[in-house]
Amino acid sequence: MKKGKIIILSAPSGCGKSTIIAEVIKDTALKLEFSISATNREPRRGETDGVNYYFLSTEDFKKAIDSDSLVEYEEVYPGRFYGTLKSEIARICADGNNAILDIDVKGALNVKKLYGDDALALFIMPPSIDTLRHRLLSRGTESVDAINQRVGKAEYEISFASQFDRTVVNDVLIDAINETHDIIAEFINK
């Protein structure tokens, strides 16, 4: 059985990354399996361990860090960790499936560095910062200050785009989905 590959998608908030992943993963010929992240936060109502996240105690998460059991992790807020377990990627790829990861820019570059040619790092880019700001405002879910923070973070994240293998500009969603699909298919089949 052919060992699976790793596809990493990263993008600033509001660039459509989750929507693109949800659409691309529907093509069963790509044999994509979403990599479940680990966290030390408590499960929310309706969340299940091993389905939504791998819920670890803070002690177990820190042990995973110390034992080099994570391909990437981040302390998102003081004391709140999220990361990707090496065992999760190994499980998916050993079954001949291709792991698809939705992670931040620095984590994506760490995974790419670790797995080299077995990994594809794909950056989803907004057409412009103004378009991104408009998309975030149109959601109507956050204050202007929160949106300004997200836009500032997006500008920082975009500065890493040149370090990714490929970049897809999400101007028209269906085009971005199709382009992402084609890039992934080409990578898997080479």
Image (tube, grey):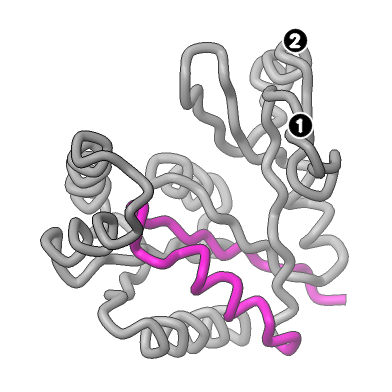
**Magenta stretch holds residue 114:** no
* Residue stretch in magenta: 1-29
**Magenta stretch holds residue 8:** yes
Residue 97 against residue 23 in the figure, above or below:
above
Q: Position of residue 120 (x, y in %)?
A: 50, 66
Q: Quadrant of the N terminus?
A: bottom right
Q: Quadrant of the C terminus?
A: bottom right
Q: Position of residue 129 (x, y in %)?
A: 14, 59
Q: In the figure, is residue 70 to the left or right of 90?
A: left
> Is 69 or 140 nearer to us in this picture?
140
Location of residue 170 by image quarter? bottom left
Which residue appears at 73% of the width and 89% of the height?
29
**Number of marks drawn:** 2
Which residue appears at 57% of the width and 86% of the height?
185
Q: In the figure, is residue 12 to the left or right of 40?
A: left
Which residue appears at 27% of the width and 63% of the height?
135
Residue topped by disc 2: 59
Q: Position of residue 124 (x, y in %)?
A: 35, 66
Residue topped by disc 1: 43
Upstream in sequence: badge 2 or badge 1: 1
Which residue appears at 66% of the width and 67% of the height?
5
Location of residue 106 by image quarter? top left
